[in-house]
Image (cartoon, rainbow, N blue to C red):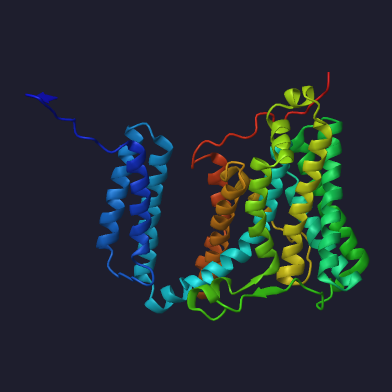
């Protein structure tokens, strides 16, 4: 609009996406203010913040950001429920559950096996092979890690045996899905059942009804002397397991490999355009086999963490669906290592919350045990946004 020689710009309005993001932040804040260290006991402020968040969600939906808007409204409703639960609980109970340093430490513990599985999925699917068999490969790592550490007397040998077992099972999946061109989802489910049978049989054959011994050599924790006794950080990361640090270090390393190194770019080209990669002389099938085997070895490391690093023993079906949660974390993270890390931390936080709530209210804790699986369903359903897998993911390749 012009006034004389002056031009006045029309007022700028917030975009629907910005409204949705602001709504998510306000919705989360509606619950956060009832938790330590703020511990606001009244419900009025939480209800007002949640109502504003829901209104912003409606604006986002009407502006075309349907998924983000629905997500904002759900966050607002969950925030009101969480605030109500906090208000009805005593301060001692709330402080017991929301000891943030303990929650952070538990989140890392629960996220570690998921992270190894999710990174394995990233490697396999970057090469174009869907690996639903992560659950079985993790389970193989659980048992053979314990068996190797028991037989050879050192946790390091146990990790190597676990990786070998996971890689061999992944090779079975590779032969079925790459060489024989079987349906990759069916093949993955098949190796899951195969792993369940193998580990159950050898557990009974080697250890009998008494189970694995209790004096297994375990992966040590890494104590950080400079921050071990420094408040929140000392309690959260001052005494974390060695495999936790290995998993965290793999995230930037794998990112650099996939997006900066020659072999990583070749792997991604095979997952995106295998015909073009074959035309320029890349060994498509060999690269896919390598990716699947490495995927199985990484997943087995996650399983070995459960048995050799965390518990120190093995029991039947020990992974308890963690391989499938890892697969969901990979999808949640949009087939990227950093995205997979944040998704695993979210799922790990769900497990940590379940544990903390169970310690003060077993009945409510049972309900919270479903939280990681609910998050898995949300991730797979695509509520957080559309994820695009590699273009040839799940499509067998046959040379002409």
- Residue at the location (36% across, 70% down)? 88
Residue 321 makes an appearance in the image: no
Indicate the quadrant containing the C terminus: top left, top right, bottom left or bottom right: top right
Asked if residue 325 lies left or right of residue 152, the reply is left
**Up/down of 386 relative to 99, above or below:** above
Asked if residue 33 lies left or right of residue 345, the reply is left
Residue 160 in which image quadrant: bottom right
Which residue occupies the foreground of this view, 302 or 132?
A: 302
User: Residue extending furthest front?
Assistant: 5
**Up/down of 261 relative to 29, above or below:** above
- Residue at the location (62% across, 42% down)? 335
**Up/down of 377 relative to 225, above or below:** above
Asked if residue 67 lies left or right of residue 33, the reply is right
User: Residue extending furthest bottom?
Assistant: 229
- Residue at the location (72% across, 58% down)? 302
Which residue occupies the foreground of this view, 262 or 311?
A: 262
Which residue occupies the foreground of this view, 392 or 349?
A: 392
Residue 251 makes an appearance in the image: yes
User: Residue extending furthest left?
Assistant: 4
Indicate the quadrant containing the N terminus: top left, top right, bottom left or bottom right: top left
Q: Position of residue 130 (x, y in %)?
A: 72, 38
User: Residue extending furthest right?
Assistant: 205
Asked if residue 167 lies left or right of residue 57, the reply is right
- Residue at the location (93% across, 64% down)? 205
Q: Position of residue 298 (x, y in %)?
A: 75, 53
Q: Position of residue 151 (x, y in %)?
A: 91, 70
Q: Position of residue 30 (x, y in %)?
A: 33, 58
């Amino acid at each position: 609009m012009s006034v004389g020689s002056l031009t006045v710009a029309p007022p700028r309005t917030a975009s629907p996406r910005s409204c949705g993001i602001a709504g998510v932040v306000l919705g989360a804040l509606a619950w956060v203010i009832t938790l330590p260290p703020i511990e606001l006991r009244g419900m009025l402020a939480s209800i007002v913040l949640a109502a504003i968040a829901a209104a912003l969600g409606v604006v986002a939906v009407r502006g075309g950001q349907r998924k983000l808007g629905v997500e904002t409204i759900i966050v607002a409703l969950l925030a009101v429920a969480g605030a109500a639960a906090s208000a009805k609980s005593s301060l001692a109970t709330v402080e017991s559950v929301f000891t943030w340093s303990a929650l952070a430490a538990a989140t890392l513990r629960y996220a570690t096996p998921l992270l190894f599985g999710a990174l394995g999925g990233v490697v396999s699917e970057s090469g174009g092979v869907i690996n639903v068999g992560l659950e079985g490969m993790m389970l193989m790592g659980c048992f053979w890690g314990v068996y190797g550490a028991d037989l050879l007397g050192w946790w390091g040998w146990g990790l190597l045996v676990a990786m070998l077992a996971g890689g061999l099972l992944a090779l079975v999946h590779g032969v079925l899905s790459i060489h024989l061109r079987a349906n990759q989802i069916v093949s993955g489910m098949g190796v899951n059942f195969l792993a369940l049978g193998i580990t159950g049989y050898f557990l009974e054959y080697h250890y009998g009804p008494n189970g694995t011994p209790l004096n297994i050599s375990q992966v040590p924790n890494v104590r950080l002397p400079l921050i071990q006794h420094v408040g929140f950080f000392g309690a959260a990361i001052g005494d974390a397991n060695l495999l936790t640090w290995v998993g965290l270090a793999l995230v930037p390393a794998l990112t650099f490999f996939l997006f900066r190194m020659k072999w990583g770019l070749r792997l991604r080209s095979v997952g995106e355009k295998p015909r073009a990669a074959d035309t320029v002389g890349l060994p498509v099938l060999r690269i896919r086999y390598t990716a699947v085997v490495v995927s199985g070895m990484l997943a087995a490391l996650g399983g070995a963490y459960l048995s050799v690093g965390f518990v120190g023993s093995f029991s039947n079906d020990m992974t308890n669906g963690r391989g499938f949660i890892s697969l969901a974390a990979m999808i949640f993270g949009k087939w990227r290592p950093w995205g997979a890390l944040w998704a695993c931390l979210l799922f790990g936080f769900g497990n940590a919350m379940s544990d903390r709530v169970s310690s003060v209210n077993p009945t409510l804790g049972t309900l919270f045990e479903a939280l990681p699986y609910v998050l898995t369903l949300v991730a797979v359903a695509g509520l957080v946004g559309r994820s695009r897998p590699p273009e040839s993911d799940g499509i067998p390749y046959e040379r002409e």
